[in-house]
Amino acid sequence: MHTTIYSARKIITMNASRPTATHVAVREGRILGAGSIDELKGWGPHELDDRFADKVLMPGLVEAHAHLMAGGLWRYTYCGYFDLRDPDGRNWPGGRTLEAVIGQLGSASARQADGPLLGWGFDPIYFGDQRVSRHDLDRVSAARAVGVLHASGHILNVNSFVLEKAGLLRAGVEHPGMPLGADGLPTGELKGPDAMTAAFAIVGLDRSFLSGDEFGVRAFAKLAVRAGVTTSTDLAATLLEPELASLLSITAEDDYPLRLVPLLRLIGMTPAQAVERSVALSSRSTERLRLGRIKVVADGSIQGFSARMRWPGYFNGAPNGLWYTAPETIRDCYTLALQNGVQVHTHTNGDEATELALDCLAAALKAAPTRDHRFNLQHCQLADAAQFRRMKALDMCVNLFANHHFYWGDQHYSTTVGPERAERMNACATAQRSGVPFAIHSDAPVTPLGPLFTAWCAVNRLTASGRVLGAHERISVADALQAITLGAAYTLKLDHEIGSIESGKRADFCVLDDDPTAVPPEQLKDVRIWGTVQGGRVFQAPLPV
């Protein structure tokens, strides 16, 4: 049995009984203990490894809401508003006007001689009231399929060519996710999975781009090492057999640096089928691929005006959003999942969707009383204090989308929900006061994978313009670091294995050049990440290209 003892400038353990240490002993990919070198020598013969002597170690960061397509989308054209780094560290500038985005797509069309052309990361909310129509994308090309996936992942804009191929460029289309123009024809904006699916294959996408794509799985792992992440969810997986085979094969490789937790999305199947499939999948879990959880999507996105809102609705008077899953389907899924020991995570952005999820779980728990189910509300952006009290009473967890403060906070304040509700969005402090276990997340690729940036957002609550959005909902640096380690692990029912550096847990570390507890809170996002240790294996992040 080979034992390695790593020295470090400081080890932040997230273990309340021993918050800091100078050394950590590892054997067979697990932690023997953390403490001083003299304490750890008691484990017997060992190798002392000083490679981290000038570094700071903390538990491997846990991203409890991301998507593997954050890797796979890099084969397409980035069309976001903000600059973004790709898996190799190369910086891609954002498109700050609609004309700039059209220009980026035009340049990509010139480089790519034929076939569908897809852009991603786009959001017209940054351009005021200006919307994108099929006519805008026709300027890129009228002779090939052109599509642009919104940053939220809930809306796809397509050109006339795509609508024609899909049989939708005609009068008489009546679909809540397909708005019509003044000419009575679809504008090319497709909202929600039902509407978007009609165009996926035409723009070069199929369900495998969500999960199981080899390029995406490997690219996502590169992003994770750069972000200090050792465990990440894939929170909308289809987990069909070919994709599952790919995931099992890639994650089994000796040099794959990440533990993946894919959740089976409840789409295209009944609740009974989803629960049965999840139970079967759980038996196929491995050390680096954890299966057996379900994801339900109740509504859309707030900035895409497809989230379900309680009265008084959207600040700018936009009509209410879309239900993605019927209430009776959610209730049946919850009941069957509770009866079969399957954990369910539910996407709710609008407060009406959150209320529905709470009602459904209350009914399901009456039918199937269950302790420690840890059902999660994901995003849950507009929940008020009363809803957090209900979450506590129902023994729920919540994973809040702290990054929204920076990326869309100004738009929420001025356009989507208005000043008062914007200041309570992603209410970490209220969750904490209410006793609701919580994590915070990036929802990559909706925003970039980077838990330390997410922690910075929860601590500072600054928008892109510099506005403090809800100072009363700020949390401390210590609490934010807890939310991206042990807190996130708890929401996944993995806190017995990961999330802290203590005896018996997996040897998963985030290796830092700076101490996140020593820098000013406003500099938390700038803490430098050297790489990771995952299951005792060391991975240094390559220097940016």
Image: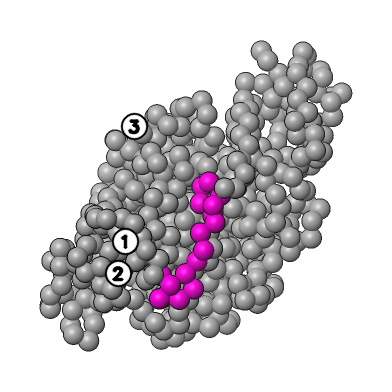
Judged by depth in the image, the label closer to the viewer, 2 or 3, is 2
Q: Residues within 10 Å of mark 3 (few under 14, many from 20)?
A: few
The residue positioned 61% from the left and 40% from the top of the image is: 541
Q: Position of residue 538 (x, y in %)?
A: 63, 31
The residues colored magenta run 85-101
Q: Position of residue 448 (x, y in %)?
A: 53, 56
Q: Earlier in the sequence, mark 1 or mark 2?
A: 1
Report the disc number at residue 140: 2
The residue positioned 63% from the left and 37% from the top of the image is: 540
User: Distance from label 1 to label 2 (Cα)?
Assistant: 7 Å
- Most foreground residue, 210 or 321: 210
- Most foreground residue, 145 or 424: 145
Q: Residue at label 3? A: 245
Disc 2 residue type (three-letter): Val
Judged by depth in the image, the label closer to the viewer, 3 or 1, is 1
Check contact, mark 3 vs mark 1: CB within 8 A: no
Judged from the image, the secondary structure of the residue bearing numbered disc 1 is: helix
Q: Is residue 477 left or right of residue 434?
A: right
User: Residue 176 colored magenta?
Assistant: no
The residue positioned 51% from the left and 32% from the top of the image is: 256
User: Residue 86 colored magenta?
Assistant: yes
Report the disc number at residue 109: 1
Q: Earlier in the sequence, mark 2 or mark 3?
A: 2
Report which quarter residue 117 is drawn in. Answer: bottom left
Disc 1 residue type (three-letter): Ser
Classify 353 as above or below 530: below
